[in-house]
Amino acid sequence: MKGKRRKEMKRTQEQIQAEIKKLQEMKPKVRRRTAFGDDNHAAIDADIAVLKDDLDLDDIYDAYEDNQHSVDSAMYAREWLDGNEDEPPSGPDGWGGLVQE
């Protein structure tokens, strides 16, 4: 998941809560497994954990070290949270692009 980079600007609590809600709502609409067998739902849960619990990089690696898909996704959520990415995890280049109606 790649978005546009920008100057660091932390997200507001309202932005964080809105993103958590979007991720929770879209999770059932995203295919459970990738073509490689990675668990998309676990990766979305990792994103939500980062946003809810303000996990830092050490926390992410400790929590998801056995699941690279979740680590990568959670690290992107952290970058968005810190204001280093414009597009949120739920955006069209992220989970939003995998939603199946």
Image: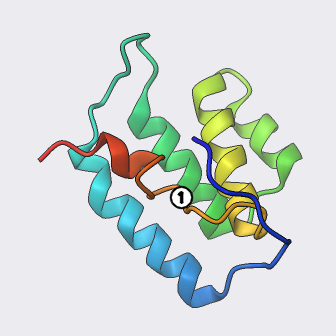
Residue 20, relative to residue 73: is it above or below?
below
Residue 41 in which image quadrant: top left
- Residue at 68% over, 35% down: 71
Colouring rule applied to residues: rainbow
Quadrant of the image for the N terminus?
top right
Residue 97, relative to residue 71: is it above or below?
below
Q: Which residue is mark 1?
A: 48
62 relative to 74 in the view: left or right = right
Residue 88 in which image quadrant: bottom right
Residue 46, relative to residue 10: is it above or below?
above
Disc 1 marks a residue whose amino acid type is Ile
Q: Residue 94 placed where, x, y %?
A: 47, 47
Q: Residue 4 placed where, x, y %?
A: 67, 57
Badge 1 marks a residue whose secondary structure is helix
Residue 79 in which image quadrant: bottom right
Q: Residue 49 placed where, x, y %?
A: 59, 57
